[in-house]
Image: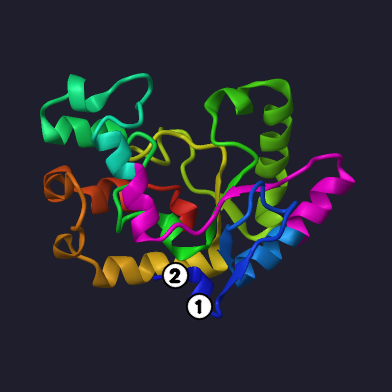
Amino acid sequence: FKPENDSNYILIPLPYANRKGLYAEKKTYEAFLRMREAAEKDGIHLQIVSACRNFDYQKGIWEAKWNGNRLVEGENLAKTTANPVERAKKILRYSSMPGTSRHHWGTDIDINSVSISYFKAEKGKKEFDWLVKNAADFDFYQVYIPKGEKRAYGYEEEAWHWTYLPVSKDFIYAYKEKVSYDDIKGFSGAETAEEIQVIKYYVLGINPECL
């Protein structure tokens, strides 16, 4: 799948994205522009830092962490974690297996930063608070809310990851109906997906409002 070849996806121009080459599902992008305009009126600047990522892109992220070419919270997992299930679980704190990422759909965007510390600092916290208060007015929802009563398992909280629900709800429904563990393959560590139950605990381990 290449979003540049699909008429349902649009290239996000600068400065709405922080770099060239990012694509989003059209309705998602249009809704983001409306939300961004409203935020600007309140002195809040919103910018997309990641959007549609196809299988190959996600595979690159995953395998760089799996093979130790990219550190995971300061760890070279290829050297520190020999057990494949444990290695996969460490990556799954913040990164999806290829074939399971919501970013494949183009309905989910990362806003302003993918750094935990950014959203704990004054500027990022102010932006996040605005999104919590206002994003639902534009049909955007935080997918990975803090773990607790509403979300017992899955990825760690991501303040930056927001989904455009009117479109993504159709994708998650289709995923539940059509995707099995036989479909999750073609990358290092894929054999761990079923044992970990990534569909139940990660694909579906989300804010219940997004189901």
Badge 2 density bin: few <14, some 14–19, many ≥20, Cα 10 Å? few
Image coords of residue 79 (percent x, y) = 19, 21
Structure colour scheme: rainbow
Image coords of residue 90 (percent x, y) = 27, 30
> Which residue carries the number 1 mark?
6
Q: Is residue 83 left or right of residue 45?
A: left
Q: Quadrant of residue 24?
A: bottom right
> Compared to 144, does 9 lie above or below?
below
Numbered marks: total: 2
The secondary element bearing badge 2 is classed as loop
Mark 2–mark 1 CB contact (< 8 Å)? yes
Can residue 204 be seen? no
* Residues at marks 2 and 1, CA–CA distance in whole angstroms: 7 Å
> Compared to 207, does 82 lie above or below?
above
The secondary element bearing badge 1 is classed as loop
Please state which amino acid type lies under the numbered disc 2: Lys
Residue at 31% over, 51% down: 59
Please say whether residue 43 is one of the residues in the magenta stretch: yes
Disc number placed over residue 36 in the picture, else none:
none
| Highlighted magenta segment, given as a residue range | 34-61
Residue at 58% over, 58% down: 21
